[in-house]
Amino acid sequence: MKQGLPGGSLTYLSDADLACIHGAALALLEDPGIFSDSAAIRDIFRRGGARVDDTAQTIHVPAELVSAALGSAPHSFIVHGRDPEMDLLLEAGRVYYGMGGTSEPFFWDYETGRPRTPTTADMVNATRVGQALSGVDFIMALCSAGDCPRDVAFFYEYDAIFRNTTKPVVVSSLGRRSVARFLEMAAAASGGEDEFRRRPWVIVYVTPISPLQATRLNEGMIEAAHYGCPIQYSPAPLLGATGPVNLRGQLIQATAEALFGLVTSQLIKPGTPFIYAPHTPAMDMRTTQVTYASAEQAVGRAVVAQFGRHYNLPTFNTGAGCDAKLPDAAAAAEAMLGMLLNALAGMTLTQCMGTLASGLYGSLEMLVICDELVRMVARALEGVPDTNDADMIDLIRRVGHHGSFIEQPHTVQHFRSDLYFPALFRRETIADWIQAGARPIVDVAHEHVEAILATAGPAPLPDGADVELERALQAGIAEFRTSGWEGTH
């Protein structure tokens, strides 16, 4: 089981600030409350003791329900992988990184240098590269199955992911029926429902609508709790659009919306694992693009991680994603800012490794570059290693004024553990770099991608799981072609 990197040293707000924002969020939950077109969600809150107005379709959440939910949600839990070595211990302050996000509509093609429509083969390749990279702790989609029928493409996408990784996987909640079918497929890949319930390796990703709404698509939480899967609740009020342009105002709204998700999860089933995951994106007022890497967003994410420590809940957010269109210097700078600030603030799960163009497409080369950045962040989080000062004094005295440390046994014994050596980035001389072809880093990253895919194959499935997974896939496709998706009819 992975223990995660140690984060949580960065704080932007005082305890008094956190208490004030929390209090403001509670006030919003009470008045005006949360609008919900879901009769099921309204009924859950009615039975839980909240005031529900079915005519206005609003839920008014009292502070005591929030307090009870904070008390019942587990502060530490394991997100399993199909392979136990890929298990993640989730708790506030532990840091992990993941590939991709929700299904991106395009894919960056190295050969043409342009985005194109992705295919199921791209989904397979992306998942296999994510499986191979040690810096990738959990898997999300890095593209979409653009060559499959659009109305059921999600089923093909999760089939490709489930067959090609043993790491924890995040799936999107598109309604209760969809989550039930996705988890049925995951259970098939586990070798049966009993095994999946024993070791659930899927996180259900719920994305409510801002401002202050919870739709029928959120009903997937019911199925997640039924299977014992962690629920990741991610409202995303846009600075200046679906949320206040003021960052503190956005944080008040996002906190209220995220706490509503927490209460929902605990009313459905007390003790359900919950990941606190409000996003803090901005809308660029010049282009109307939703940002993935704005400075305000990075600060907001760090505060979300701080709230996770305050509430003693695991957290999730963007951080490795870029607004840059190419896997270049701009992309690396944006990714490193987000990844490092998230880690310093103690964000538990940071997504979007390999994502470009504000989430519109992914890149395998950028994924490999982000894997290198994870290793750099890990070294930064280690800080200054503990050393016996007396031994260092003796060593420095032995070398004296005119000696060299390179010939000392201490250097030979410790340089591999005390110094960071990049796997992708290069430190050769200029002459050696020119002799090797003077290649930009994206070319070197592409070589790494090709080397991985040359030997990568599907992830092993239990006996009989292949047939059962195909059955679950076809059953889901048949059902949704007949009845459609929730909220669309």
Image (tube, rainbow, N blue to C red):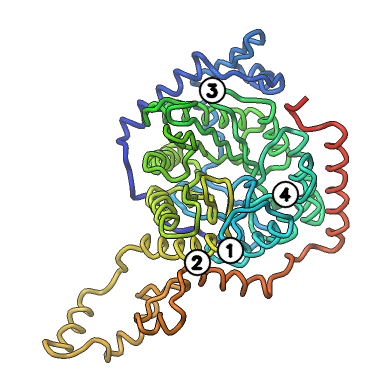
Q: Where does label 1 land, which residue?
A: 110
| Disc number lying in front (4 or 1) | 1
Mark earlier in primary sequence (3, 2): 3
- Residue at the spot of label 2: 442
Return the residue at label 3.
Answer: 212
**At numbered mark 2, what does the secondary structure look like: helix, strand or loop?**
helix
Whichever of labels 4 and 1 marks the residue nearer the N terminus, that label is 1
Mark 2 or mark 4: whose residue is earlier in sequence: 4
* Residue position for label 4: 146
Figure quadrant of residue 269: top right
Tell me which numbered mark, 1 or 2, is placed earlier along the sequence: 1
Q: Nearer the viewer, residue 393 or 446?
A: 446
The quadrant of the picture occupied by the C terminus is: top right
The residue tagged with tag 1: helix, strand or loop?
loop
User: Dot 3: what SS?
Assistant: loop
Name the residue located 69 percent from the left edge and 26 percent from the top edge. 216
Residue 180's quadrant in the figure? top right
Q: Nearer the viewer, residue 270 or 155?
A: 155
Picture coordinates of residue 463, whole percent (x, y): 85, 64
**Label 3 to label 1: alpha-carbon separation:** 41 Å
Q: How many marks?
A: 4
| Crowdedness near tag 1: few (<14), some (14–19) or many (≥20) residues, C-alpha within 10 Å | some
- Say if 457 sits above or below 404 in the image: above
Check disc 1 and give the amino acid type.
Tyr
